[in-house]
Image: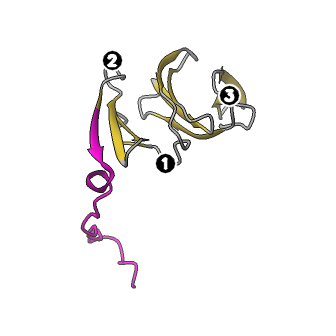
Amino acid sequence: TASTDGTARLWDVRAATEICVFHGHDAPVEEIFLTPDARRIVTASRDGTVRIWDADGQEVCLLPGQPDWPRAIALSPDGTLLVAPAAGGVARIHGLSNADVTRARTESVDEVAAPQAPRETPPDRPSPAD
């Protein structure tokens, strides 16, 4: 969970117990993502930073602050890529599958957010118009 006190928490939902608290942000945490393999947690805060953590609460990487806090970060479905905004209308794409997540590829926001063709409805499901 994300919190206004600058922390994030990882919970065992079945046992209703807190597993870990992530400390480091200086302002409310607005977004939190858990990778599908549960090895990395990504947080974005109003302090302008994005932080990447391991599941034990150790900070793996601090992505530097932005002039306007990162309002939209996203993980790829497989959890191996993080997209975060950067100054100048670009998005930085960070690989999360290796130890060096500080290396990033920079793309224009238009390239990252290009519209995709509509997905086809699987044959066993009714279309939204039905």
**Number of marks in the rendered image:** 3
Which amino acid lies under the numbered mark 2 shown in the image of this protein? Asp
Where does the image place residue 21, in percent across and percent down from the top left? 67, 22
Q: Main secondary structure of the magenta part?
A: loop
Which residue: 28% across, 38% down?
Answer: 106
Is 59 placed left or right of 125 in the picture? right
Contact? badges 2 and 3 (CB < 8 Å): no
What number is the disc on residue 26? 3
Residue that badge 1 annotates: 72
Viewer-side residue, 27 vs 98: 27
Viewer-side residue, 70 vs 73: 70
Mark nearest the camera among 1 and 3 is: 3
> Is residue 104 in the magenta section?
no
Mark toward the start of the polypeptide (1 vs 3): 3
Which amino acid lies under the numbered mark 1 shown in the image of this protein? Ala
Which residue: 44% across, 33% down?
Answer: 35
Where does the image place residue 61, in percent across and percent down from the top left? 46, 20
User: Residue 122's quadrant in the figure?
Assistant: bottom left
Instruction: Quote the CA–CA distance across marks 1 and 3.
Output: 18 Å
Where does the image place residue 99, in percent across and percent down from the top left? 34, 16
Q: Secondary structure at mark 2?
A: loop
Residue 87 vertical placement versus 100 (above, below):
below
User: Residue 68's quadrant in the figure?
Assistant: top right
Which amino acid lies under the numbered mark 3 shown in the image of this protein? Asp
